[in-house]
């Protein structure tokens, strides 16, 4: 699909506080939720309908970390693990971009316009 992505904008229905971490997430996914969700809520761009995307992003990041530990424990090359990890990395990258969690996605004018203070974005240093 080609074209420009829609501009991100604040919405009156936005969540303003990070919701509790879903109990069903893995420990790695929970850690990612705790890392990114407060900053996403502060941006006032996510609604309750977007929580599933954040959950999916956290699951993908958690899976990348889990598979990496398995790869490091194994002495042999395992093509299945590498393919699974590559797929999880791609999914995490795509969702991170959609959620404004990458340097490139944060540098888009539509994301920069949300910030009245350039130092206000807590994700800039991530």
Image (cartoon, rainbow, N blue to C red):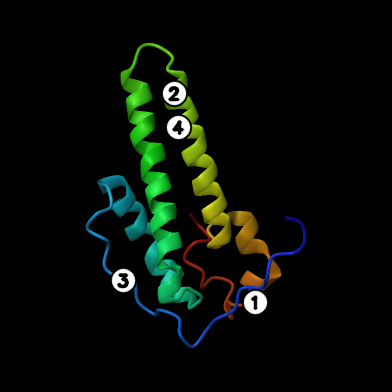
Tell me the distance, in whole angstroms, between the alpha carbons under discs 4 and 2: 6 Å
Quarter-wise, where is residue 104 in the image? bottom right
Q: Residues within 10 Å of mark 2 (few under 14, many from 20)?
A: few
Instruction: Name the residue at 58% across, 56% down.
Output: 97
Mark 1 vs 3, N-terminal side: 3
Of circles 1 and 3, the one toward us is 3
Mark 4 and 2 residues: CB-CB less than 8 Å, in contact?
A: yes
Q: Which residue is mark 2?
A: 80
Q: Is residue 26 above or below residue 14?
A: above
Q: Position of residue 76 (x, y in %)?
A: 39, 11
Q: Position of residue 112 (x, y in %)?
A: 64, 71
User: Which disc, if any, is residue 84?
Assistant: 4
Mark 1 and 4 residues: CB-CB less than 8 Å, in contact?
A: no
Q: Residues within 10 Å of mark 1 (few under 14, many from 20)?
A: some
Q: Position of residue 118 (x, y in %)?
A: 59, 72
Q: Which residue is mark 1?
A: 113
Tell me the distance, in whole angstroms, between the alpha carbons under discs 2 and 1: 43 Å
Q: Is residue 121 left or right of residue 16?
A: right
Of circles 2 and 3, the one toward us is 2
Q: Which residue is mark 3?
A: 19
Q: Position of residue 101 (x, y in %)?
A: 53, 58
Mark 2 vs 1, N-terminal side: 2
Instruction: Name the residue at 44% across, 23% down.
Output: 80
> Which residue reaches farthest top?
76
């Amino acid at each position: 699909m080609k074209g420009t992505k829609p501009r991100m904008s604040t919405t009156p229905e936005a969540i303003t506080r990070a919701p509790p971490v879903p109990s069903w997430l893995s420990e790695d996914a929970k850690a990612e939720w705790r890392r990114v969700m407060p900053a996403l809520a502060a941006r006032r761009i996510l609604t309750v309908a977007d929580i599933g995307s954040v959950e999916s992003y956290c699951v993908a990041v958690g899976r990348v970390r889990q598979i990496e530990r398995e790869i490091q424990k194994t002495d042999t090359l395992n093509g299945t693990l590498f393919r699974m990890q590559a797929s999880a990395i791609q999914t995490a990258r795509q969702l991170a971009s959609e959620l404004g969690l990458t340097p490139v996605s944060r540098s888009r004018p539509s994301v920069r316009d949300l910030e009245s203070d350039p130092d206000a974005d807590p994700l800039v240093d991530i």
